[in-house]
């Protein structure tokens, strides 16, 4: 709450300053100037009043230009045609997430009537004997007539689990952004909602479900896959829920590995930020399963990836999977740009290759921080102390907030060179990046196994 009060007072100071000095501005103009003052004040850790001390500006267009140069020094030096984003900024005392060290233990478990006799429901009853179990007609019926869910409910989602019979939306092509080069990936929609808390996670805005949804009828997924499959395809979990975070309770990985043993011309990926690999190590896989980790420098993990495994734990888990015969993958995604980023990512890559040999890596993806505009307010309200929004994030080619093109190019170019020093044979690709970027980097989409 201390951070919340600090940022709330900062916002109040900015609003008071604008009201007192620019009462003649319209509502939208006041909102823009207030946000600019707030963001500069937060980034530079100075009072909003100090930003205007030397400006003596009363004309809106001149004042805005002055503040844009302070808030976006890099982008404004290139052109004043860049597209910043100024949504209304509000704070509520019930919305900031309180981070506490805890083990996952849901208090309420709702079981779809059609799934009540299944093994997943039994497993959860055994694993969480203190939880209340309620049988529901269906997930759709349960949510019918429910009020719209907000941030406060999303913050409590780990307290509830819904075990359901899934009837649709089993698979989908990876939702690549408009205008970007796609990697041809497919998503196995096994579960919805994540027990981890990453400041940048798109699910914060994407979902309004007050709990973790787990399908009990995984065999139905397998039936549908026989019609969906394509020879040579890559498919995996981890888009809408971490692949392994709850695997000790669901046992999904055991069934997935057994199933994909029949489809050796398909590559299946478990994508995770956990170190829950116990089931993987005791499985008899057929070589077409890749276990991959999203990775970042440990300091960024500490500040932005709450409840996840540490970098060391992730790399140790990857090394154990390699010993068990798996290939592994790594996702530098999102790469966070900040002062000193290069040094931190260089150290990360050094640590990676001290534990993992290039020959054991199936692929590495790289994607800089980007997100839909609506997520900006959610991050601010849930994580008022965040620093990931302090950099220059502007509307890009796909109308998502991104770093400027030349900053992204610098990041990709340097990371690719860092990686290539360890091996020229690594399969590298960019995630959700535009054609021009691939071209300037002289990068081609690799052929996947």
Image (tube, rainbow, N blue to C red):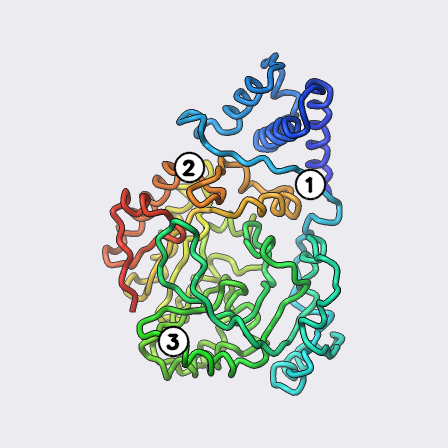
x 69%, y 41%: residue: 3
State whether residue 402 is above or below residue 290: above
Dot 2 surroundings within 10 Å: few (below 14), some, or many (20 or more)? some
Whole-percent x, y for residue 408 in the image: 38, 41
Label 1 and label 2: CA atoms lie apart by 29 Å
Whole-percent x, y for residue 435 in the image: 32, 47
Asked whether residue 438 is in view, the answer is yes
Label 3 and label 2: CA atoms lie apart by 38 Å
The image quarter in which residue 386 lies: top right
Secondary structure, mark 2, is loop
Secondary structure, mark 1, is helix
x 49%, y 38%: residue: 393
Whole-percent x, y for residue 37 in the image: 62, 27
Q: Which residue is mark 2?
A: 404
Pick the quarter of the image with the N terminus: top right
Asked whether residue 317 is in view, the answer is no
Secondary structure, mark 3, is loop
x 55%, y 53%: residue: 201
State whether residue 390 is above or below residue 117: above
Dot 3 surroundings within 10 Å: few (below 14), some, or many (20 or more)? some
Q: Earlier in the sequence, mark 1 or mark 2?
A: 1
Residue 229: numbered disc: 3
Q: Which residue is mark 1?
A: 3
Label 3 and label 1: CA atoms lie apart by 49 Å
Dot 1 surroundings within 10 Å: few (below 14), some, or many (20 or more)? few
| Front one among 16 and 414 | 16
| Front one among 2 and 85 | 85
Q: Earlier in the sequence, mark 3 or mark 2?
A: 3
The image quarter in which residue 166 lies: bottom right
Q: Earlier in the sequence, mark 3 or mark 1?
A: 1
Whole-percent x, y for residue 70 in the image: 52, 24
């Amino acid at each position: 709450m201390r951070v919340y009060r600090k940022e709330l007072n900062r916002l109040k100071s900015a609003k008071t300053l604008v009201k007192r000095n620019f009462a003649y501005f319209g509502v939208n103009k006041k909102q823009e100037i207030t946000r600019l003052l707030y963001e500069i004040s937060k980034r530079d850790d100075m009072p909003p009043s100090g930003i205007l001390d030397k400006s003596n500006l009363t004309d809106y267009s001149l004042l805005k230009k002055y503040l844009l140069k302070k808030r976006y020094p890099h982008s404004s030096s290139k052109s004043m045609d860049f597209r910043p984003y100024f949504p209304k900024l509000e704070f509520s005392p019930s919305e900031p997430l309180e981070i506490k060290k805890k083990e996952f233990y849901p208090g309420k478990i709702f079981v779809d009537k059609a799934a009540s006799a299944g093994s997943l429901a039994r497993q959860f009853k055994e694993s969480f004997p203190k939880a209340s179990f309620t049988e529901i007609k269906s997930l759709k019926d349960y949510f019918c007539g429910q009020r719209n869910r907000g941030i406060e409910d999303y913050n409590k989602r780990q307290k509830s689990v819904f075990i359901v019979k899934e009837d649709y939306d089993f698979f989908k092509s990876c939702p690549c952004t408009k205008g970007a080069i796609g990697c041809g990936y497919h998503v196995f929609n096994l579960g919805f909602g994540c027990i981890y808390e990453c400041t940048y996670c798109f699910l914060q805005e994407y979902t309004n479900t007050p709990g973790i949804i787990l399908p009990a009828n995984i065999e139905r997924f397998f039936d549908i896959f026989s019609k969906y499959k394509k020879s040579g395809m890559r498919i995996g979990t981890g888009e809408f829920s971490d692949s392994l975070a709850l695997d000790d309770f669901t046992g999904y990985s055991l069934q997935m590995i057994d199933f994909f043993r029949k489809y050796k011309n398909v590559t299946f990926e478990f994508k995770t930020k956990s170190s829950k690999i116990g089931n993987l190590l005791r499985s008899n896989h057929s070589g077409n399963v890749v276990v991959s980790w999203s990775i970042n420098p440990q300091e960024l993990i500490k500040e932005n990836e709450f409840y996840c495994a540490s970098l060391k734990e992730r790399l140790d888990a990857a090394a154990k999977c390699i010993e068990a015969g798996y290939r592994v993958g790594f996702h530098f995604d999102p790469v966070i740009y900040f002062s000193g980023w290069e040094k931190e990512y260089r150290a990360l890559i050094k640590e990676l290759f001290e534990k993992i040999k290039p020959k054991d890596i199936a692929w590495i993806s790289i994607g800089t921080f980007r997100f839909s505009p609506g997520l900006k307010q959610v991050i601010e309200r849930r994580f008022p102390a965040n620093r990931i929004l302090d950099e220059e994030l502007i509307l890009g080619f796909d109308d998502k907030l991104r770093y400027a093109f030349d900053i992204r190019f610098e990041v990709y170019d340097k990371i690719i060179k860092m990686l290539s020093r360890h091996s020229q044979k690594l399969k590298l690709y960019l995630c959700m990046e535009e054609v021009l970027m691939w071209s300037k980097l002289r990068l081609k989409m690799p052929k996947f196994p």
